[in-house]
């Protein structure tokens, strides 16, 4: 008479045998011609920017085209809407010179990087993907993970030259750089619009796992 232990071990052996029979499938040669997730397009820089803006806004994000530091700070102050503190990456990790000092001169302090009371977080980006309107952020020294995840409103500073055609282009760039986004960063995330879910009752809720609003400041475009 078989015991429960015998039955469990028997099932495990059957599962191992089934897995072994699939070895030939798992060892297939890679495809000769990989397919892009999104059909590649020949775009000028301006067309790629327009594609990114359209895709990002279709996801519920807001894109603001700003010039230099002055226009960027003016837009940031508008989004702060009277707040006297914000989370931010270190200045060395942002594409604006002395943003911290400029904000402090306007009465806005940079909070401790895990301050749960800060409503706004300001980051740079590692790349942007025109095909999907997504942002790629790598955490590390001076690039705090909580800055883009903890506040209700995320402000991302983006330079036009950081916009790549799609995820495949970013992956290819990572291959050439020795996969630095994974080897040298504590965390790499891809952000596509504000945080939202419709898991419960198919009712859309924003801010479920991150910011309710995403504002992208496109610098010099």
Image: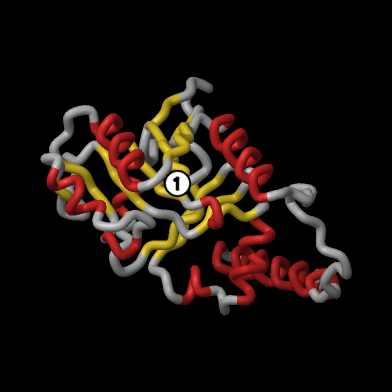
Where's the N terminus, which quadrant? bottom right
Q: Name the quadrant containing residue 153.
A: top left
Left or right of 153 in this view: 47: right
Which is more toward the observer, 111 or 103?
Answer: 103
Which is more toward the observer, 192 or 25?
Answer: 192
- At 47% from the left and 43% from the top, the residue drawn is 218
- At 23% from the left and 28% from the top, the residue drawn is 81
- At 57% from the left and 65% from the top, the residue drawn is 3
Residue 105 in the image: state x and y as whole percent. 13, 45
Which is more toward the observer, 167 or 155?
Answer: 155
Where disc 1 sits, the SS reads strand
Residue 171 in the image: state x and y as whole percent. 63, 64
Q: Which residue is mark 1?
A: 219
Residue at the far bottom in the pictured view:
178
Residue 103 in the image: state x and y as whole percent. 19, 45
Compared with 95, 191 (above or below) is above
Residue 29 in the image: state x and y as whole percent. 85, 75
Identify the coloring. Answer: secondary structure
Q: Name the quadrant containing residue 186.
A: bottom left
- At 82% from the left and 71% from the top, the residue drawn is 30
Left or right of 189 in this view: 12: right
Graded by Cα atoms within 10 Å as few (under 14), some (14 to 19) or many (20 or more), the crowding at tag 1 reads: many
Task: Examine the rendering and report whether any part of residue 1 can be seen.
Answer: no
Left or right of 104 in this view: 218: right
Task: Examine the rendering and report whether any part of residue 121 can be seen.
Answer: yes
């Amino acid at each position: 008479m078989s015991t429960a232990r015998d039955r469990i071990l028997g099932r495990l052996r059957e599962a191992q045998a089934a897995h072994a029979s699939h070895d030939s499938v798992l060892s297939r040669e890679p495809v000769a011609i990989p397919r892009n997730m999104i059909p590649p397009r020949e775009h000028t820089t301006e067309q790629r920017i327009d594609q990114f803006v359209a895709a990002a806004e279709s996801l519920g994000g807001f894109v603001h085209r700003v010039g230099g530091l002055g226009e960027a700070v003016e837009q940031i102050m508008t989004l702060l809407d009277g707040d006297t503190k914000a989370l931010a990456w270190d200045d060395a990790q942002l594409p604006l010179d002395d943003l911290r000092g400029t904000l402090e001169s306007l009465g806005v302090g940079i909070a401790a990087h895990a301050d749960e009371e800060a409503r706004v977080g300001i980051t740079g980006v590692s790349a942007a993907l025109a095909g999907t309107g997504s942002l790629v952020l790598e955490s590390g020294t001076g690039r705090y993970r909580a800055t883009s995840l903890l506040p209700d409103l995320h402000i991302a500073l983006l330079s036009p030259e950081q916009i790549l055609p799609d995820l495949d282009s970013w992956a290819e760039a990572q291959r050439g750089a020795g996969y630095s986004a994974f080897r040298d960063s504590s965390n790499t995330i891809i952000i596509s619009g504000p945080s939202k879910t419709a898991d419960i009752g198919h009712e859309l809720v924003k801010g479920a796992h991150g910011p309710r609003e995403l504002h992208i400041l496109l610098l010099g475009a």
